[in-house]
Amino acid sequence: MIIVPEMSTSEMMNYLSQPLIAKLATINFNGTPQLSPVWFIFENNKFYISTYEKALKISNIKRDDRVTLLIDSTDGGLKLKGVLVRGVAKIISGEECKKIEKKIYDKYLTDEIIIKDEVARLFKQVALCSPDSVCIEVRPLKITTWDYTKLRPEDIKNK
């Protein structure tokens, strides 16, 4: 049996502040899962994602607001960390979404990046002006974390 260590709240907050790619799972019309890689921010105990009104994930959420969000990373071997969120989604538009979008793009396309990369600068500029954008708010019902980098020999029990 292996007892996998969890992240502390502060470790999770630090982890989620990094520009990691989340995988958002929504439910398609036929009941199959739809996975979408997304950028996100986590604040006030909620996850926020920016997307476009015509995205499949939006029509899925309008029909069924249950979602799962996975943020995980590895540096190989047992250097695994992650956060799994089961929650409900809500669509946000207008000025509230624009403020959220700015925070998301600032997290992933920092000043340092856009100074060096013209495509990134143009991408951010155009994306922030898009009239088609909406945001998704994910309210967690359950959050599970793991951090294999904290695994110790005593956490591994041979039965």
Image: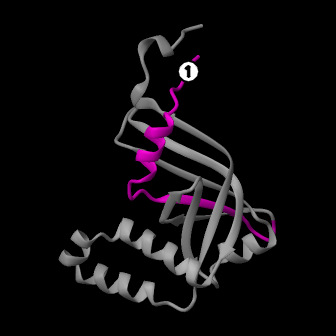
**Helix, strand or loop for disc 1:** loop
Quick one: 139 or 32, which is closer to the camera? 139
The mark tally for this picture is 1
Residue, x 39% and y 30% (percent of image)? Answer: 149
Residue, x 45% and y 69% (percent of image)? Answer: 104
| Image coords of residue 65 (percent x, y) | 76, 65
Residue projecting furthest to the top: 159
| Image coords of residue 148 (percent x, y) | 45, 30
Stretch of the chain drawn in magenta: 1-30
The residue that label 1 is drawn on is 3
Say left or right for 39 vs 137. Answer: left
Tell me which amino acid carries mark 1. Answer: Ile
| Image coords of residue 141 (percent x, y) | 71, 48
Say left or right for 147 vs 89. Answer: left
Residue 16 vertical position relative to residue 36 in the rendered view, above or below: above
Colour pattern: one colour
Residue 131 vertical position relative to residue 35 in the rendered view, above or below: below
| Image coords of residue 59 (percent x, y) | 73, 77
Queried whether the magenta region covers residue 69, the answer comes back as no
Say left or right for 57 vs 128. Answer: right
Quadrant in the rendering for residue 50: bottom right
- Quarter holding the C terminus is top right
Residue, x 51% and y 80% (percent of image)? Answer: 98
Quadrant in the rendering for residue 32: bottom right
Residue 83 vertical position relative to residue 19 in the rendered view, above or below: above
Q: Residues within 10 Å of mark 1 (few under 14, many from 20)?
A: few
Queried whether the magenta region covers residue 12, the answer comes back as yes
